[in-house]
Amino acid sequence: MKLTLPQALRAGIEAQARTAYPAECCGLIEGALVEGRADGEAMLALALHPARNIAERRDRFEIHPEDHFAALRTARANGHAIIGCYHSHPGGIAQPSPTDRAGAGEENFIWLIAALAKADAPLSLGAFVYSRAGFLPLDLPGPR
């Protein structure tokens, strides 16, 4: 599976991660399945829905329910779906954490993880799809 993430959306995630640092930012990804691809299933990210992080700890994320429902309504109105979530790992790596593994549950849901080793460090972005087998790496081609 492949995810196409336009440069403007990458930049949006980076800006949110830097603004929230040292806490985690979070949000949802609106997108669509790209039909008729010969090289396998592909998803296209179309919009980000930044969300309030209501987790009590800075090293966790929990999307505010009102923001989640608003994103679902907007995606449906646009004829799309919420295909995944994104969040940052301040001081961490762009890999699912044990907390991410414990909180995941929706089959074929995409997880983007934006890691900043420190506030002014380059952003590292990892993409995964959740399945019963756990988090599987997702092909995330470079910016376009």
Image (spheres, rainbow, N blue to C red):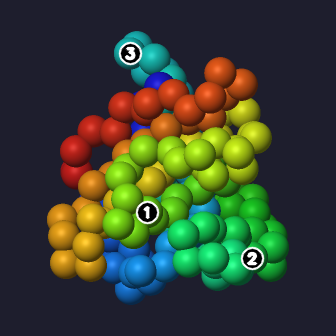
Q: Secondary structure at mark 2?
A: loop
Q: Which mark is residue 135?
A: none
Frontmost residue, 70 versus 66 = 66
Kindly identify the residue that appears in the image at 49 percent across and 38 percent down.
128
**Of discs 1 and 2, which sits in the foreground?**
1
Residue 64's tag is 2
Residue 47, given in percent of the width and then of the height, sits at 51, 64
Q: Is residue 87 visible to the viewer in this orientation of the structure? A: yes
The residue nearer to you, when weighing 117 against 142, is: 117
Q: Earlier in the sequence, mark 2 or mark 3?
A: 3
In contact (CB < 8 Å): disc 1 and disc 3: no
Q: Quadrant of residue 2?
A: top left
Amino acid marked by disc 3: Asp
At 38% from the left and 50% from the top, the residue drawn is: 94
Q: Residue at x 27, y 39 (%)?
A: 141
Q: Report the Cα–Cα distance between label 2 and label 3.
A: 36 Å
Labels 1, 3: front one: 1
Which secondary structure, mark 1?
Answer: strand
Residue shown at the point (44%, 54%) measured from the top left: 113
Residue hosting label 3: 39
Residue type marked 2: His
Structural crowding at the residue carrying mark 3, measured as other residues with C-alpha within 10 Å and reported as few (<14), some (14–19) or many (≥20): few
Q: Specify whether residue 49 is in view.
A: no
What separation in Å lies between label 1 and label 2 (alpha carbons)? Answer: 18 Å
Closer to the chain start, of discs 1 and 3, is 3
User: Which numbered disc, 1 or 2, marks the residue that appears first in the sequence?
Assistant: 2
What separation in Å lies between label 1 and label 3 (alpha carbons)?
Answer: 31 Å
Q: Which mark is residue 89?
A: 1
Q: Tell me if 69 is positioned left or right of 27 in this view.
A: right
Q: Is residue 39 above or below residue 57?
A: above
